[in-house]
Image (cartoon, helix red, strand yellow):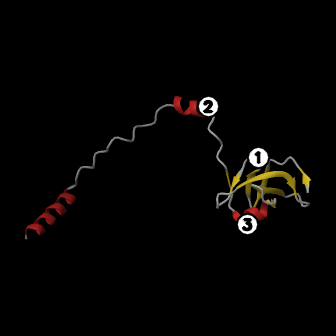
């Protein structure tokens, strides 16, 4: 094992950000230990478990997704000061019925009365 300052690693065409905690499909949180295997592959660790190579973690528990970052004050301010979006809460009026729609309705009403 050697120590490296890796920040990303490409695995099966997917770039994994090693600076962020990665979450597996079972909810486990994997962090880069800062060390690599003899082949140069990053070692990941979940809690107090034994470190595993990233490819093994990905094959066993993957796919991995980066853990969400906490919302900063600047993020909250940007959302609160953004331009308001179009109001989508208003009910839209249904389209005017066509003559065909009206004829179908009349036919259904006739069948009920017969």
**Residue found at x 87% / y 53%:** 35
CA distance separating discs 3 and 2: 37 Å
Instruction: Name the residue beneath numbered marker 2.
Output: 73
Percent position (x, y) of residue 4? 88, 49
Q: Give the quadrant of the C terminus.
A: bottom left
Q: Disc 3 or 2, which lies upstream in sequence?
A: 3
Res 99 → quadrant: bottom left
Q: Which mark is residue 59?
A: 3
Q: Give the quadrant of the N terminus.
A: bottom right
**Residue found at x 27% / y 49%:** 95
Percent position (x, y) of residue 34? 84, 50
Instruction: Name the residue beneath numbered marker 1.
Output: 19
**Label 1 environment density (alpha carbons within 10 Å; few <14, some 14–19, many ≥20):** some
| Residue 78 in the image: above or below residue 10 | above
SS at badge 1? loop
SS at badge 3? helix
Percent position (x, y) of residue 22? 71, 53
SS at badge 2? helix
Q: In this view, which residue lies farthest toward the bottom?
A: 114
Q: In this view, which residue lies farthest toward the left?
A: 114
- Relative placement, left or right, of 86 versus 54 is left
Q: Disc 1 or 2, which lies upstream in sequence?
A: 1
Percent position (x, y) of residue 14? 72, 57
The reply to whether discs 3 and 2 touch (Cβ–Cβ < 8 Å) is no
């Amino acid at each position: 094992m050697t120590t490296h300052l890796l920040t990303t690693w490409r695995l099966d065409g997917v770039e994994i950000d090693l600076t962020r905690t990665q979450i597996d499909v079972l909810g486990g949180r994997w962090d880069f230990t800062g060390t690599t295997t003899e082949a140069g592959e990053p070692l990941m660790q979940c809690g107090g478990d034994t470190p595993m190579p990233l490819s093994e973690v990905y094959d066993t528990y993957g796919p991995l997704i980066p853990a969400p970052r906490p919302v900063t004050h600047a993020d909250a301010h940007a959302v609160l000061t953004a331009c308001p979006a179009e109001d989508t809460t208003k009910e839209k009026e249904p389209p005017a019925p066509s003559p065909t729609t009206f004829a179908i309705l009349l036919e259904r009403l006739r069948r009920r009365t017969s």
